[in-house]
Image: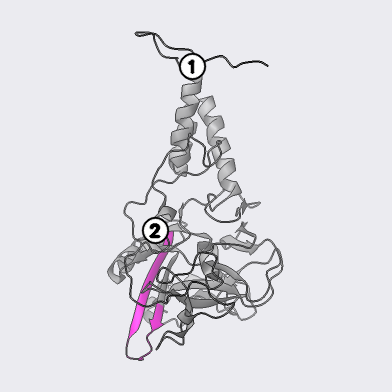
């Protein structure tokens, strides 16, 4: 039987083991480069051949998963139109408070996620699904929900709003009444189109009624939403720029008031930011869902019908009514449906 040698003891004053310069260089590169945006990564890649090769590897890995391993399944980019390998943004599976400036996020290193060399940079997903501290007393003491039924579904005065168990309930994450809280569970991919830019496609057969994803991003005040929209309009007038600021209006049960929710997925969001508008209503249905313990609802997407693999996902952004004052600022629609109106809906239409 062979015995293992005891660890070598270092004498007092003896120099520690020296890490080779090449290994130290690669360690530093793997710590820093995956957190750079495309412009910064491009600048670094021009400094030397080694960094150029590392940058190319990072770009390749970024194209394999837009969700940065924060979803159940990888969501790859596919582009046969031009040289753009991926779209850069900070990923969050949930609604989060507005962040300025947006945080750094690890994406695309050659080392695997979870390795010891991965730094602990701010990850928006770690703030939790209920990142906004807006909790109420509603909920239930359920420890186990029956399939399709829970006391949470019987909130008085909220019959028109879907409800799920949440932080105000006693059941666990495996509860059958938390369908939309478990992330993306169908295969999707992001495809580059010559006219529409990046689009979200099904990569498998999706049955009618299946959950796709929620619309995740930064929760903004109305003033901040207007400020950002003005910036986005100016950027669009001078360059090719697409924003993903969605305004949702929830009419309260009394009928006397309307709750406005502004979700901006332009800088921080999830795959829903790639879902395009269709004038015929698209193949997705939108449902406002409120989880017990949270005041604000979430906009969730479900398959309105069976969706085959390689089919683009789309929904209606709203009604189009172009008036004289906003006719010059209209956005062209390229949905290609038989009833296309030629103009994208926006807050002013």
What is the CA distance from the residue labelled 2 to the residue labelled 1? 47 Å
Residue, x 68% and y 69% (percent of image)? 206
Q: From the viewer's perspective, tell me whether residue 38 is left or right of residue 205.
A: left
| Residue numbers of the magenta segment | 249-266
Mark 2–mark 1 CB contact (< 8 Å): no
Is residue 282 inside the magenta stretch?
no
Q: Quadrant of residue 199?
A: bottom right
Task: Out of 65 and 89, give the one closest to the viewer.
Answer: 65
What colour scheme does the image use?
one colour
Q: Quadrant of residue 223?
A: bottom left
Q: Considering only vertical position in the picture, is 339 above or below 134? A: below
Q: Quadrant of the C terminus?
A: bottom left
Q: Nearer the viewer, mark 2 or mark 1?
A: 1
Residue, x 50% and y 16% (percent of image)? 7
Q: Which residue is mark 1?
A: 20
Q: Please, what secondary structure does the residue beneath circle 2 have?
A: helix
- Specify the principal SS of the magenta part: strand
Residue 25 location (% of width, % of height):
47, 24
């Amino acid at each position: 039987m062979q015995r293992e040698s005891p660890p070598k003891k270092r004498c007092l004053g003896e120099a520690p083991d020296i890490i080779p310069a090449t290994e130290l260089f690669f360690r530093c590169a793997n710590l820093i480069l995956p957190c750079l945006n495309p412009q910064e990564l491009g600048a670094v890649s021009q400094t030397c051949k080694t960094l150029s090769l590392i940058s190319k590897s990072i770009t390749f890995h970024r194209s394999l998963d837009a969700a940065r391993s924060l979803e159940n399944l990888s969501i790859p980019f596919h582009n046969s139109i031009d040289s753009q390998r991926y779209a850069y943004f900070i990923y969050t599976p949930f609604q989060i408070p507005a962040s300025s400036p947006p945080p750094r996020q690890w994406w695309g290193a050659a080392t695997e996620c979870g390795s010891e060399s991965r730094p602990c940079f701010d990850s928006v997903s770690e703030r939790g699904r209920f990142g906004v501290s807006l909790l109420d007393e509603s909920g239930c003491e359920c420890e186990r929900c029956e399939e399709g039924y829970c006391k949470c579904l019987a909130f008085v005065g909220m019959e028109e709003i879907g409800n799920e168990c949440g932080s105000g309930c006693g059941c666990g994450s495996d509860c059958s009444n938390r369908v939309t809280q478990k992330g993306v569970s169908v295969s999707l991919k992001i495809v580059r189109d010559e006219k529409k830019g990046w689009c979200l496609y099904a990569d498998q057969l999706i049955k009618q009624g299946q959950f796709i994803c929620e619309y995740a991003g930064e929760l903004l005040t109305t003033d901040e939403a207007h400020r950002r929209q003005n910036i986005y309009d100016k950027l669009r007038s001078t360059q090719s720029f697409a924003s993903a600021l969605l305004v949702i209006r929830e009419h309260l049960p009394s009928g006397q008031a309307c709750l406005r929710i502004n979700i901006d997925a332009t800088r921080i969001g999830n795959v829903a930011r790639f879902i395009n508008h269709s004038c015929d209503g698209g193949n997705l249905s939108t449902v406002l869902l409120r989880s017990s313990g949270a005041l604000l609802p979430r906009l969730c997407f479900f398959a309105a019908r069976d969706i085959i693999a390689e089919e683009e996902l789309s929904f209606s952004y709203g009604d189009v009514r172009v008036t004289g004052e906003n006719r010059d600022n209209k956005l062209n629609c390229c949905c290609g449906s038989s009833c296309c109106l030629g103009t994208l809906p926006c807050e002013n239409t």
